[in-house]
Image: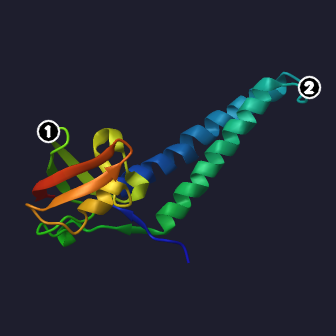
Amino acid sequence: MSKPVILTYEGLKKLEEELEYLKTVKRAEVAEKIKQARAFGDLSENSEYDEAKNEQAFIEGRIATLEAMLKNAKVIDEEDIKLDQVSIGCTVKVYDESYNEEVEYTIVGSAEADPMNNKISDESPIGKALLGKKVGDVVSVEVPAGIIKLKILEIRK
């Protein structure tokens, strides 16, 4: 049995929208590119055709991945998010003692992690360290830059 894909409602919607876009818009675009490339004649040395076929393979692979993820999706109900400890779906404000700054992280499943927007996976080093902790707790986390200490200041939805 496949591992469940943990998603927030927002993450579920984003994946559904991406799947719909790939199926309706991108498939048609690539089919048109293939059609145009075929019109150039000899396919054995037709780089446009090869490129379009590669793009088609990538899109079909992504569609299959998204369909599998959605099939195994377990959506976190916002009502089930408890604020007494860090869990998937909550936003955590921490004080980073190493860099002397406050940072906010939203803990999400790995499928919707977006570190550039401070959405970190529950499977990431920081995500793992924060899960289950309470306001006031201090955690030490080993990251590529070394060990950092984070003090939990606030937990919210």
Q: Residue at x 89, y 24 (%)?
A: 41
Question: Which of the two residues, 9 or 30, is positioned nearer the viewer here?
Answer: 9
Q: Residues within 10 Å of mark 2 (few under 14, many from 20)?
A: few
In the rendered image, the quadrant that contains the N terminus is bottom right
Residue 147, above or below 12: above
Q: List x then y, in percent, for residue 40.
A: 84, 21
Circles 1, 2 touching at the beta carbon (< 8 Å) = no
Q: Secondary structure at mark 1?
A: strand
* Image-quadrant location for residue 140: bottom left
Left or right: where does residue 66 sit relative to residue 134? Answer: right
User: Amino acid type of disc 1?
Assistant: Glu
Earlier along the polypeptide chain: callout 1 or callout 2? Answer: 2
**Alpha-carbon span between mark 1 and mark 2:** 61 Å
Q: Secondary structure at mark 2?
A: loop
Q: Residue at x 78, y 32 (%)?
A: 50
Residue 5, above or below 27: below
Q: List x then y, in percent, for residue 61.
A: 64, 50
Q: Which mark is residue 66?
A: none
User: Amino acid type of disc 2?
Assistant: Asp
Mark nearest the camera among 1 and 2 is 1
Residue at image mark 2: 42
Residue 73 in view here: yes
Question: Which of the two residues, 80 or 103, is positioned nearer the viewer here?
Answer: 103
Q: Residue at x 45, y 70 (%)?
A: 4
Left or right: where does residue 40 sit relative to residue 71? Answer: right
Residue 5, above or below 24: below
Left or right: where does residue 77 sit relative to residue 154? Answer: right
